[in-house]
Image (cartoon, coloured by chain):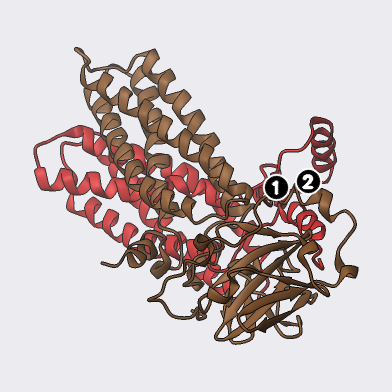
Chain colours: A brown, B red
Amino acid sequence: MPKSLVRRILEGKPLRQPLHTMLVHFPIGLFVVSLVMDVASYFGAGDYALFRGSLYTLCAGVAMGLIAAVPGFVDWTDIRRDNPAKGIGQWHMGLNLLVLLVYGISIIARFSMTDPRRVGLPLIFTSLAAIGLLSVSGYLGGMMVYDDGIGVGRHRRRAPAPSRTIALPSTSAEEGWVPIPGAEHMEDGQTLRLDVGGVIIGLARVGTAYYAFQDFCTHRHGPLSEGCFMGDQVMCPWHGSRFDLRTGHVTHGPAKKDINIYEVRNLNGEVSVRIPEAKVPTTARRDSARSGTEEREWKVEPEDITSPTTEQAPRAE
Amino acid sequence: MRPTTPPEFAGKLAAMAKRLTLKDILQGKPLGHPLHPLLVHLPTALWPAALVFDVISFARKDGDISLTLATWWCLLVGLVAAAAAVPAGIADWTSIHRERPAWKIGLIHAGLNTAVMGLVIANFILRCIRGPAEPSVTVAQLTLSIISVLLLLPSGYLGGLMVYDQGIGVARTSKDYWRRIARAGGARV
């Protein structure tokens, strides 16, 4: 099976939703019910069945947790490096692995009990602590989806999302035109996220045309460089607002305001973009640290141009 | 919810507490995330898990009462969480504009979940009548478990579509954070 197909399946694209978030229901639910059964066993009359039932749910929870880790990791690799969710994802992964480790030890301890009739307080507190960690981790997972929109609308795209924001100093501009090194190698449907002198823009190649536009939707500011491109329109991955890439006009709600678009030219393979100075806010340089762009690097590297060669242009599904 | 400086956070909390309505609480505003998807982890996981325990119990017929007991607890804990998830889900649904596809998806999702809830309650009552720790699951109980899971899976799928395809609840609380980033990045907001 081609690598890109495996990736597509692990990301849940054929299902139009991430696989990881479907699978994580199981460890969360099973660990909680196991704790409830442990507490019932502690206050009960010493019931072998209850102890055993709790152990079954724990084993099932750990197994499902390990399965869920695989698509979760794949999802994480897909997050843009300067997105706050990238760091959150690391904590989420670390905590989850810790929780699985704690439950693994708990399971071994339960199997090696000589009188398995009642779960003792140490095991109950271990489970409580693990549920505490799991809650924090689950909350972080929720942040990634509901704050940063990770996995939302991703299935409408075939090309991968930009892996980082490429900072291009506007000082390299010649009559306002900032060259984008390597952009001529972009594949159809591929996008770059650029920081040109503090202005964050998305650059997309659709067919033979290049479009440059503000990377933020005007509705809830979703990343348009991770959106879906249909002809000369872009669709925001989060709530499906659509904009005309030639004029910036909204063609479909929920967004009400138009986006900024920027001039792009392709001179003998050298793609450049022009950002009118008037649109550069004076605070942009200072605040660009908050948007987490990397100031030092400004060259487009081969990794940015890697696009699935076998895949077609993105389509609306 | 994004971390802010402690005084700013305390101020926000105080201001929020004054303005909070029941709908806000049900939508998970104090939490910073929708409450409904958080609560549904339990029934979504536990009712299929209960079915798995039932199937093993039915297939083995060796009178392992820990399996039927595990099912009983899975059904119970799932029901408690589901009961809490219903008002939260309705609150989220009332915020969806009627012309959006998610409105109809939500309606089907709610209908399926109502049917599932009914079946699980019936299943749970049957098990309580016979006692939670029976040596083996009956055909009636197993059938109820199978039908409820068969309805639950498409319903959960529709719920997932509302979030990951339609963006319901996405950037509801973080839109101010992203607006600041967008404005700093020279975007029209």
Rendered location of residue B155, percent (x, y): 43, 63
Instruction: Give the numbered dot on residue B29.
Output: 1
Rendered location of residue A124, percent (x, y): 40, 20
Q: Answer yes or no: do the residues labelled 2 and 1 have beta carbons within 8 Å?
A: yes
The quadrant of the rendering that contains the N terminus of chain A is bottom left
Q: Observer-nearest residue: B34 or B108?
A: B34
Please tell me which residue is depicted at 20% across the width and 36% down the height of the picture.
B134
Rendered location of residue A316, percent (x, y): 52, 80
Give the image quarter of residue A140: top right
Residue of label 2: B20
Q: Observer-nearest residue: B42 or A225?
A: A225
Picture layout, residue A122 above or below residue B103: above
Q: Can residue A222 be seen in this view?
A: no
Among numbered discs 2 and 1, the one appearing first in the sequence: 2
Q: Does A277 sit left or right of B83 as displayed?
A: right
Give the residue type that dot 1 points to: Lys
Give the residue type that dot 2 points to: Leu
Q: Numbered disc 1: what chain? A: B
Please tell me which residue is depicted at 85% across the width and 72% down the height of the picture.
A276
Q: Can residue A186 be seen in this view?
A: yes
